[in-house]
């Protein structure tokens, strides 16, 4: 830690910084002070201390693609630029045969993960999605399948007439390896009613992940930030995730997702600055002292900011993606054709002074690029 910066901190700020440097857990009030009062350079140094405690100088990525079976969705989230209703212009709904052909086309590509998410379709059950997983596994038997947000899983279980645990067991038997962190948005109940009033509620989201962890299905977790939430809302969200991780230890990574204002009903909120992005990464890394990885999802934040984020607590840049996702491009993200080669992503990491590590989906190192 830079001694000059430490010497400039006010006494109460110095106490918080000392706790962080001593690897002591900070509380919600202290997290609020980090957001509201700490200099960004100090936050970066503190976050980097925690980042290197967990992951040394390594920065991770994987070889992955996305399959988005449909953007037809029952929900009406104000921030969403992606979803459509049945027969609405711009809607899609791929058949199992089309999904099979997509999976088949990547047989020789070297990918290690298929990420499957989409809209919460009104008519599709857990049985259907188990068949979808089996379809992909039949073509790519050695690939890790990370699939379905908690909102999708909660609805497909309800549609099937079973509880969430039963639905997850069915998906796991079909080949589900882990679940992503989408659909968390913001946990505060009152704010959630304003921005996604009919979506899976906070307790149900947390319960899907709790049940998954109990079944040995690891997951990621997210926050949607930079819209109409406050710092208090963010800290509450992080605190609920930290409590669940204390209980289950099932989260691999936390992914802050920046609200993008294009083509949705919350465009009036605008977008927060890059400085705010970095502040949010740093506080997240410091507060979530029990989640090993913080990911900057580069198709959402852009390559340049993702590289800078590696100095603010981030240790993972997601993957190669190969231009297979539309969720953020439809909202006006920085990367309209998200794709990077292994050489490109490893060079970005090395140019930032970090060691690039190709990983599998549970963060086992496959290749280290010195």
Image (cartoon, helix red, strand yellow):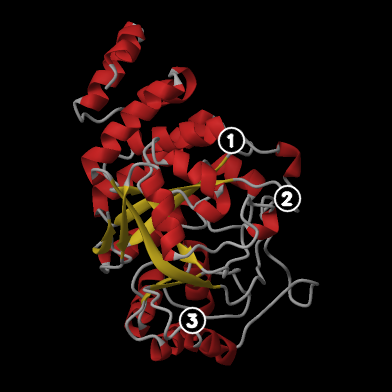
Q: Is residue 250 above or below residue 125?
A: above
For label 3, the residue is 129
Mark positioned earlier in the residue sequence (1 or 2): 1
Which part of the image, by quadrant, shows the N terminus?
top left
Image quarter where the C terminus lies is bottom left
Closer mark to the observer between disc 1 and disc 2: 2
Q: Which mark is residue 262?
A: 2
* Residue 155 in view: yes
The secondary structure type at the circle numbered 3 is helix
How many C-alpha atoms fall within 10 Å of the one at disc 3: few (<14), some, or many (≥20)? many
Q: Residue furthest left?
A: 22
Please tell me how crowded label 2 is: few (under 14), some (14-19), or many (20+) other residues with Cα within 10 Å. Answer: many
Horizontally, residue 227 falls left or right of residue 28, namely right
Instruction: Verify CB contact (< 8 Å) between mark 1 and mark 2.
Output: no
Of the numbered discs 3 and 1, the one sitting upstream in the chain is: 3
**Whole-number angstrom distance, CA of label 3 to CA of label 1:** 33 Å
Distance from disc 3 to disc 2, alpha carbons, whole Å, reads 30 Å
Q: Which residue is mark 1?
A: 229
Horizontal relation, residue 192 to residue 83: left or right: left
Label 1 vs label 2: CA separation? 18 Å
Q: Residue 338: x percent and y percent? A: 57, 61
Of marks 3 and 2, the one in the foreground: 2
């Amino acid at each position: 830690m830079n001694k000059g910066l430490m010497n400039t901190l006010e006494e109460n700020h110095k106490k918080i910084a000392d706790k962080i440097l001593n690897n002591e857990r900070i509380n919600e009030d202290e997290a609020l002070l980090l957001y509201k009062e700490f200099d960004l350079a100090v936050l970066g140094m503190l976050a980097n201390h925690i980042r290197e405690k967990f992951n040394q100088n390594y920065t991770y990525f994987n070889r992955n693609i996305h399959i988005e079976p449909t953007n037809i969705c029952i929900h009406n989230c104000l921030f969403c630029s992606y979803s459509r209703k049945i027969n609405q212009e711009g809607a899609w709904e791929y058949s199992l045969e089309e999904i099979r052909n997509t999976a088949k086309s990547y047989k020789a590509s070297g990918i290690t993960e298929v990420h499957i998410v989409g809209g919460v379709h009104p008519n599709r059950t857990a049985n259907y999605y188990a068949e979808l997983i089996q379809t992909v596994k039949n073509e790519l038997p050695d690939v890790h399948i990370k699939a379905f947000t908690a909102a999708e899983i909660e609805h497909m279980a309800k549609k099937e007439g079973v509880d969430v645990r039963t639905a997850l067991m069915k998906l796991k038997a079909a080949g589900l390896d882990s679940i992503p962190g989408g659909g968390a948005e913001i946990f505060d109940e009152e704010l959630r009613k304003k921005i996604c009033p009919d979506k899976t509620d906070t307790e149900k989201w947390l319960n899907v992940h709790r049940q998954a962890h109990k079944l040995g299905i690891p997951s990621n977790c997210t926050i949607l930030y930079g819209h109409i939430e406050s710092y208090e809302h963010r800290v509450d969200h992080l605190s609920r995730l930290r409590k669940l991780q204390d209980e289950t230890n099932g989260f691999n990574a936390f992914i802050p997702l920046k609200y993008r204002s294009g083509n949705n009903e919350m465009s009036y909120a605008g977008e927060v600055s890059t400085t705010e992005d970095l502040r949010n990464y740093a506080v997240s890394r410091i507060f979530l002292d029990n989640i090993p990885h913080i990911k900057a999802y580069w198709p959402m934040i852009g390559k340049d900011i993702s590289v800078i984020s590696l100095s603010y607590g981030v240790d993972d840049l997601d993957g190669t993606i190969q231009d297979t996702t539309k969720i953020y491009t439809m909202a006006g993200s920085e990367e309209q054709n998200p794709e990077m080669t292994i050489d490109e992503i490893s060079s970005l990491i090395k140019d930032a002074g970090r060691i690039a590590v190709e990983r599998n989906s549970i963060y086992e190192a496959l290749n280290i690029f010195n």
